[in-house]
Amino acid sequence: MPRDYEIMIAFRQAVKRDAAGRYTIRTLDFVEELNSLNWRYSLRAANKWIEMHTTTFRDISLREGEERAFQVFNPNG
C-alpha cells in the first residue's frame, strides 16, 4: 500500500548531481522511483507534482514533451 510521504522520498532519490555539481532531476527517473514504491504516476502527473511541490527547481528541458528535466536554482539570485 503506497503512502503519501513516499512521494517525497522518491523525489529525493531521483535527484542526481551533474558533472558541474548542479542538482537535476528527470521526470523519467522520478516515475521509476515512484514505481519502485508502488506509486503509479504518468509523466504528466509527475511533472505536475514537481511544479506544485517544489519551489527551487526550474524546467531546463531542451525539447517539448512530457520527458522533462528540472534543475535547482536560487530564486534570490
Image: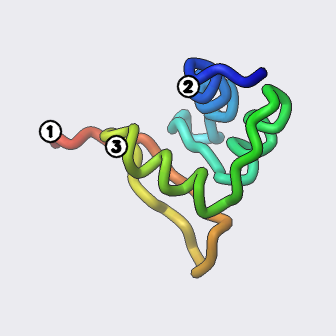
Q: Earlier in the sequence, mark 3 or mark 2?
A: 2
* Pick the front one: 72 or 19: 72
**What is the crowding at mark 3: few (fewer than 14 residues within 10 Å), some, or many (at least 20)?**
some
Tag 2 secondary structure: helix
Percent x, y of residue 40: 76, 45
Give the alpha-carbon distance from disc 2 to disc 1, as whole Å: 24 Å
Q: Residue at x 82, y 38 (%)?
A: 35
Q: Residue at x 60, y 63 (%)?
A: 44
Q: Quadrant of residue 17?
A: top right
Please report contact status of discs 3 and 1: CB closer than 8 Å, yes or no.
Answer: no
Three-letter amino acid code at disc 3?
Phe
Q: Tell me the tag on residue 8.
A: 2
Please identify the residue farthest to the front as the structure is shown.
Answer: 1
Give the alpha-carbon distance from disc 3 to disc 1, as whole Å: 9 Å
Q: Residue at x 56, y 43 (%)?
A: 24
Residue pointed to by mark 3: 73
* Pick the front one: 50 or 64: 50
Please report contact status of discs 2 and 1: CB closer than 8 Å, yes or no.
Answer: no
Tag 3 secondary structure: loop
> In the image, 35: left or right of 19?
right
**What is the crowding at mark 2: few (fewer than 14 residues within 10 Å), some, or many (at least 20)?**
some
Q: Tell me the tag on residue 11.
A: none
Q: Earlier in the sequence, mark 2 or mark 1?
A: 2
Instruction: Select label 2 or label 1 by which is in front.
Output: 2
**What is the crowding at mark 1: few (fewer than 14 residues within 10 Å), some, or many (at least 20)?**
few
> In the image, 56: left or right of 26?
left
Three-letter amino acid code at disc 1?
Asn
* Pick the front one: 55 or 76: 55
Three-letter amino acid code at disc 2?
Met
Percent x, y of residue 39: 74, 36
Quadrant assignment for the N terminus? top right
